[in-house]
Image (spheres, helix red, strand yellow):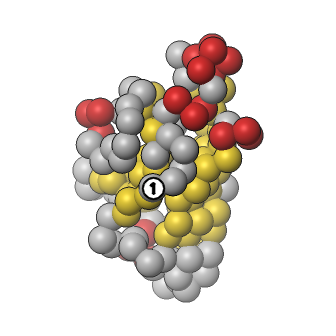
Amino acid sequence: QVQLVESGGGLVQAGGSLRLSCAASGRSLSTYGMGWYAMGWFRQAPGKEREFVAAITRSGSNTYYADSVKGRFTISRDNAKNTVYLQMNSVKPEDTAVYSCAAANAIGIVTAQSDYDYWGQGTQVTVSS
């Protein structure tokens, strides 16, 4: 089992920056370490379906982004700290959503929600214009 807890959300003005963190814990991490899991960030805006934002491989050597955030957001990870980050720069009002991190017992980049095994509860990000 893996538990994921997001933090760092809040209210930010358009054009500003925010860094989200996702802390992982659980029995599986004790056995395999966080480097066993591919990680991703997703978001869900009011009235919309949850959508993919960014993903990172087990080692952090490869990343992938949705077109809507490419060039503005950066996903990274620190396996020694069991933490994944999402640096959000030049935010826009349309970035307003609940952001959730997810873990997949998989190799490579994982973008499909159905391929993720564990999910956090999410953290609210609100961008004012």
- For the point 53% across and 66% down, which residue is it? 74
Amino acid type, mark 1 = Asn
Query: Based on the displayed image, in which of its 4 quarters is residue 33 positioned?
Result: top right
- Position of 78 compared to 70: left or right? right
Q: Report the side of 119 relative to 79 (left or right).
A: left
Q: Is residue 77 visible?
A: yes
**Which corner quadrant of the image does residue 2 belong to?**
top right
Q: Residue 16's x, y, as percent?
A: 60, 81
Residue depicted at 45% across the width and 55% down the height: 62
Residue 66: x, y in percent?
32, 64
Q: Does residue 122 lie above or below 35 as drawn?
A: below
Residue found at x 38% / y 32%: 106
The part of the image, by quadrant, that contains residue 5 is top right
The residue under label 1 is 62
Secondary structure state at the residue bearing disc 1: loop
Choose between 13 and 103: the one closer to the eye: 103
Q: Is residue 98 visible?
A: no
